[in-house]
Amino acid sequence: MTRTIIILLLSLAFLLVTAGCTSVLPVQNPENGQPYVTQTPLPSEGTPEVYAPQVQTSSSAVGISAISRMLIWAELVDCDGYHEMDGLTLKYRFYDTMNRPVAFDGTAISMDITIYTPDTDRRNQQISPRLLYRGSTTISRSLPEGDYPLRGIWVPYRELALLDQDRGIGRIHIKATLPNGMVLEAEERYIWPQKRS
């Protein structure tokens, strides 16, 4: 009996949720039976033409000479499927002065990585961020567009010097040194909890 009531309630909730989604569908115009169409008229003389926006290519000129800034972010990785944090994949993307991604391959860029704790501890008291990890690596190509969870710089969680009072990861800082001598720095702030044993 209880199972039947639960199934009926779940069915009712599903119907209510899907009924609310009908507002996304196009509404018929009562005058001519056609769906409403919203268009911005284009200034033109004579017959109207189809307007197609200009699509900008996603990459600028290939090569490190076009790089002017760097963006970083991190993703937690669970390698063994036991819902625990096995490490971080640090992602990076380089941009030119027009804010377009720069693609490169075969060029060595030195990356110095530092990871710190947040500025509060587990008791939520203000602390000076403590260094958890310092390392360096060399990358030789840009990351491809799309969802590639394991592409990037791998930092195993076991290499982070976390203590019991630490809340986890608070700040990730990367300094990239290009072959032409240019130095780029990027930082990202997180509050990821400490891994429990």
Image (tube, rainbow, N blue to C red):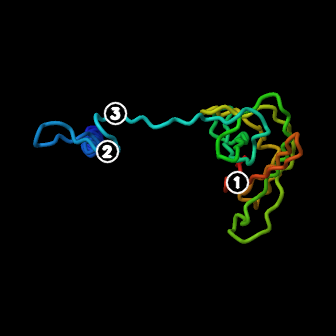
The answer to whether residue 48 is above or below residue 68 is: above
Q: Nearer the viewer, mark 3 or mark 1?
A: 3
Where is residue 81? Give x, y as percent.
63, 33
The residues tagged by marks 2 and 3 sit, at their Cα atoms, a distance apart of: 10 Å
Query: Do the residues under discs 1 and 2 have CB atoms within 8 angstroms?
Result: no
Q: Secondary structure at mark 3?
A: loop
Q: Which residue sits at x=77%, y=34%?
A: 63
Any part of residue 16 in sight = no
Residue type, label 3? Glu
| Quarter of the view holding residue 124 | bottom right
Q: Which residue sits at x=73%, y=65%?
A: 121
Q: Which residue sits at x=13%, y=37%?
A: 33
Any part of residue 67 in sight = yes
Residue annotated with mark 2: 41
Is residue 7 rendered to the left or right of residue 129? left
Where is residue 3? Give x, y as percent.
30, 38
Judging depth in this view, the residue of 152 and 67 nearest the camera is: 67
Label 3 or label 1, whichever comes before in sequence order: 3
For this orientation, the residue located farthest to the front is: 45
The local crowd at label 1, few if under 14, some if 14 to 19, many if 20 or more residues have their Cα within 10 Å, is some
Mark number displayed over residue 16: none
Residue annotated with mark 3: 49
| Quarter of the view holding residue 135 | top right
Residue annotated with mark 1: 188
For this orientation, the residue located farthest to the top is: 106
The local crowd at label 3, few if under 14, some if 14 to 19, many if 20 or more residues have their Cα within 10 Å, is few
Q: Secondary structure at mark 2?
A: loop
The residues tagged by marks 3 and 1 sit, at their Cα atoms, a distance apart of: 46 Å
Q: Quadrant of the N terminus?
A: top left
